Image (tube, grey):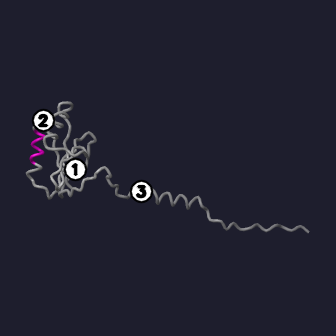
Amino acid sequence: MQFRKREEEDYSIPLTSLIDVVFLLLIFFMVSTVFIDFSRKIDIELPESKTSDSSTNIKNIEIDMNLNNKIYLNGDVITEEGLESKLVKISSENGNKTVIIRADKRLNYGSVIKVMGICKGAKLRDIGVTVK
């Protein structure tokens, strides 16, 4: 007598499709996550605007002003006199740079205007103010 071997049923879980689903979820959460700008170490609360331009240029001059009247030029603390001399130097090397001012909304308006005047005195004409 010849006996036929009964085929065993496969009870394993197909891991290939499961791995694909996990990778798709991982990519979805990575893309949908809000990325934090870790280069900003200054606590500044920006004013809000109904229309704002979110485009950024890598070759910008960034001036940050916090509530304690400290001025930061590209992340480094600087005085008003130092800011003026540094901007004149930058302007003489390349005068068509854009100045982006990030000032705390609780800061005195006159302080921001003073920094804008320093920028204009350094012959930098393209000045922008960052808002939310």
User: How many tags in the picture?
Assistant: 3
Q: CA distance from mark 3 to mark 1?
A: 24 Å
Which range is magenta?
Answer: 113-120
For residue 53, the mark is: 1
Q: Name the spot of residue 11 as percent of width and height, x first.
A: 67, 68
Q: Nearer the viewer, residue 80 or 36?
A: 80
Q: Quadrant of residue 132?
A: bottom left
Question: Which numbered disc, 2 or 1, marks the residue that appears first in the sequence?
Answer: 1
Q: Nearer the viewer, residue 37 or 131?
A: 37
Q: Which residue is mark 3?
A: 30
Q: Which residue is mark 2?
A: 123
Closer mark to the observer between disc 3 and disc 1: 3
- The secondary structure that most of the magenta stretch takes on is helix
Under mark 3, the amino acid is Met
Q: Quadrant of residue 47?
A: bottom left
Q: Name the spot of residue 66 as percent of width and height, x first.
A: 18, 53
Q: How many residues crowd around disc 2 within 10 Å: few (fewer than 14), some, or many (20 or more)?
A: some
* Residue positioned 55% across, 62% down in the render: 18
Under mark 2, the amino acid is Lys
Magenta segment: does it hold 116? yes
Secondary element at image label 1:
loop
